[in-house]
């Protein structure tokens, strides 16, 4: 399985509009987002995008399974930061994601590192080095949102309709 990791920054007249703009900036706006916990299945390849995911499979309104971190704010000069970190076994390609958000890049990076270390310790595993993608912005005049998303795969509603 390929898991795409990308980020988005958005602004708008409300924090919800800023969130939608950030989803659009990341390339995942036209899906129904379904949040997952933080387990990376075996044989998964993590692909990091520096910009918008150009073409994601699926159609308008499909379910999209993701691990997502997002932070919104409408306070002038406030910072918004979001990040996802992961560890992954080199052989099996199984691993763990964590997601954090906050008002500074340093705090998000620290929380990601500490969480992944704790999750591995709880499981008594060492999946190797910690990787992360972090994004942030500052609220100027309009509300802002920073998000980082790990996109698993879309799923059509047609299979649900066909079962009825």
Image (spheres, rainbow, N blue to C red):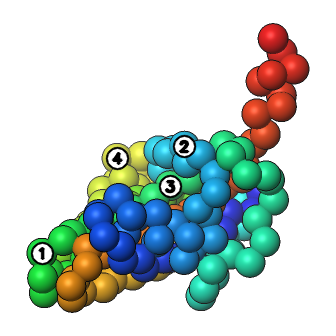
- Image height of 93 relative to 82, above or below: above
Q: Which mark is residue 75?
A: 1
* Residue lying at 49% horizontally and 45% vertically, measured from the top left: 35
Percent across and percent down for residue 74 are 18, 71
The first of marks 3 and 4 along the sequence is 3
Between label 3 and label 1, give the one nearer the viewer: 1
- Residue 56, percent across and down? 76, 65
Point out which mark residue 122 bears: 4
Earlier sequence position, callout 3 versus callout 1: 3
Q: Check disc 2 and report the residue beneath it.
A: 34
Residue position for label 3 = 67
Gap in angstroms between the C-alphas marked 3 and 4: 20 Å
Disc 1: CA contacts within 10 A as few (<14), some (14-19) or many (>=20): some
Spatial CA span between label 3 and label 2: 8 Å
Give the CA distance from mark 3 to mark 1.
Answer: 26 Å
- Work out which quarter of the rendered image holds the N terminus and state it: bottom right
Marks 1 and 2 close (CB-CB < 8 Å): no
- Residue for point 30% across, 85% down: 137
Q: CA distance from mark 4 to mark 2?
A: 26 Å
150 with respect to 104 (left or right): right
Checking the image for residue 148, the label placed there is none
Disc 4 element: helix
| Residue for point 72% across, 59% down | 44
């Amino acid at each position: 399985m390929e898991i795409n990791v990308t980020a988005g920054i958005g602004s708008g007249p409300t924090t919800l509009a800023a969130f939608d703009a950030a989803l659009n900036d990341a390339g995942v706006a036209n899906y129904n987002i379904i949040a997952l916990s933080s387990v990376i299945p075996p044989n998964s390849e993590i692909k990091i995008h520096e910009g918008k995911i150009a073409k994601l499979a699926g159609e308008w309104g499909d379910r999209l399974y993701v691990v997502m971190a997002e932070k919104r704010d409408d306070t002038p000069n406030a910072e918004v930061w979001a990040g996802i970190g992961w560890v992954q076994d080199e052989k099996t390609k199984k691993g763990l994601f964590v997601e954090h958000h906050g008002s500074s890049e340093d705090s998000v990076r620290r929380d990601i590192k500490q969480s992944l270390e704790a999750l591995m310790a709880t499981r008594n595993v060492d999946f190797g080095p910690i990787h992360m993608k972090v994004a942030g912005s500052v609220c100027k005049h309009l509300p802002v949102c920073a998000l980082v998303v790990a996109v698993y795969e879309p799923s059509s509603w047609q299979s649900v309709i066909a079962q009825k």
